[in-house]
Image (cartoon, grey):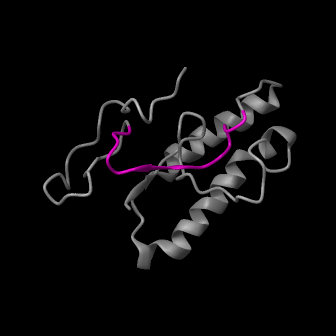
Amino acid sequence: MHGRLTGARTCRTIARCGPSSRPPSWSARGDLRAEDALGEALAAVAAGNKPLKAFIHLDPDLGRAAARAVDDSIARGEDPGPLASVPFGVKDLDDSAGMPTAKGSRWYAGGPPKDADSIHVASPT
């Protein structure tokens, strides 16, 4: 499986691989900031991706921006939703705005970044 580590509209950046021992509401409770969760996930990808090649495109800057937005929202007392700080990845078959989609094929490799998210990736808001 190839995925792209992104920042998600709910923290759509790092690839659906947050620490499973923490409940999704950890950030809203103040147990772990979204930026810290993203940092942990990016570190895990960096440590294990070379032999696995699970992530073919990473956009840590987009992820950090999204994580900061979640942390800022929580700091203002807003509820960004239960999964807002959970990092996740997007399979390379689904378009993610600003990222290339190779569909797991050399035929599509090297294509331009997509203009919009696919329906499977887009935020409901």
> Where residue 116 appears, x then y in whole percent?
34, 30
Residue drawn at (38%, 39%) of the image: 96
Residue 46 place in picture, x, y as percent: 52, 70
Residue found at x 76% / y 26%: 79
Furthest residue in direction bottom, as rendered: 51
Q: Main secondary structure of the magenta part?
A: loop
Kindly indicate the quadrant of the structure image that contains residue 105: bottom left
Residue 5 lies, with reference to residue 44, above or below; the image says above
Q: Is residue 7 left or right of residue 57?
A: right
Residue 24: name its quadrant. top right
The residue depicted at 69 percent of the width and 54 percent of the height is 37
Q: Is residue 58 visible?
A: no
Q: Is residue 41 left or right of residue 34?
A: left
Q: Quadrant of residue 41?
A: bottom right
* Whether residue 108 is visible: yes
Is residue 85 a member of the stretch shown in magenta?
yes
Q: What range is drawn magenta here? A: 82-96
